[in-house]
Amino acid sequence: MKLAGAPAGYRIEQVDLAGADDALMRQVVALTHALNAEAHPEDPPYPDAMIEARFRATSTLFRRREFVALGDGRVIGRAMFERNLSGSNEYIRELELAVHPGHRRRGIGRGLLAAGLAEIGDGDARLLEWFTTSRVPSAGAVSTHLGAKPGLRMRVSQLDLGSIDRSLMNAWAAAAPAGYRLEWIVDAIPDRLMEPALQAFRAINRMPLEELDSEPWKFTEEVVRDWERTRRKRGLSSWLLVAIADASGDGAGFTDVVFDVRYPHLVHQGGTAVDPDHQGRDIGKWLKATMVNRILADLPAARFIRTENAGTNAPMLAINVRMGFAPAWEDTIWQMPLADAKRYAAR
């Protein structure tokens, strides 16, 4: 469906990328390659199939509305507005918006924003949220110009697996705290471990949020099963390591990674957290070292692990730095009242 608001020489259309035909998807993949090359020039290109799977995968707990900007006979911009139905932070609408570097400063981003905001009027939405990377400084400048608030600044760190101190990792992994055991979970959490895993996940809500307007996340079996289904659709693999207290059977902490065998050189570190009742026993070091040792053993082509931490999360940053993680760049989560965003887009 063609929409009003596009600058001269361009048009904006609402699309459904999950069901897009091959011609449109090739254009979206090409745009993604251009954006990735700008933000991560040191990385090899993602396989086309990996990018396509990301856009075709859908979630039962998040509703997407998607738009593309077309010019020069190709897709040169895209926007995705996501409504959260997971039971947590449902007043926030997530935004992804990107314009090809060769077509910026022409009003395309504003047109995409206006098109999406015209469709947002349901539920109790009051905040728009998106993230930018310091690798693309113009995105942060535009966010400031919009009047958005930088809610949470996150350090993106990278661990070069070729230079890791293996003796240190072996020492941390061998220092198992008395009264705890580890459970390995590949891709899907078995029913018997669901409750301990949920208990461990809830510890992530202690992460510093700085100025971010965000509720504690509610971790339920429904939410976790939706994560698992979505990962499968995208072709991703996940490893989850849960520390369990023997006396109670409770989940004391966790760490997890996600990777794609089609892109073997990079592993993404997800969350790591330890429940306050179980801190002070080096469980975090134990978890992270055990995970790294498995990556070294079972993913020999992996070159880097990347992770994000709140810039004020001193305990986790200290562990990462000791492991050899080095700062790579900064990501920022921005928030803006939805009403203010709509007024801006309507100018």
Image: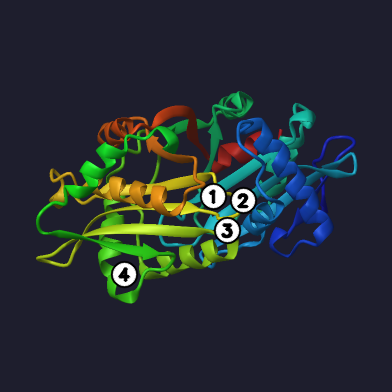
What is the x, y in percent for residue 52? 69, 56
290 and 285: which is toward the camera: 290
Alpha carbon distance from label 3 to label 1: 11 Å
Q: Earlier in the sequence, mark 1 or mark 2?
A: 2
Look at the numbered disc 4 and give the secondary structure of its residue.
Answer: helix
Q: Are marks 4 and 2 in contact (CB under 8 Å)?
A: no
> Is label 4 or label 2 in front?
4
Residue 194 tag number: 4
Give yes or no for contact between labels 4 and 1 (Cβ–Cβ under 8 Å).
Answer: no
Classed neighbour count for the residue bearing mark 4: other residues with Cα under 10 Å, few (<14), some (14–19), many (≥20):
some
- Amino acid type, label 1: Arg
Residue tagged 3: 122
| Amino acid at dot 3 | Asp
Q: Are marks 1 and 2 in contact (CB under 8 Å)?
A: yes
19 left or right of 174 in image: right
Secondary structure of residue under mark 3: loop
Q: Disc 1 designates what residue?
A: 93
Q: Nearer the viewer, residue 61 or 337?
A: 61
Q: Along the polypeptide, which appears first: circle 4 or circle 1?
A: 1
Is the residue 57 above or below the residue 283 in the image? below
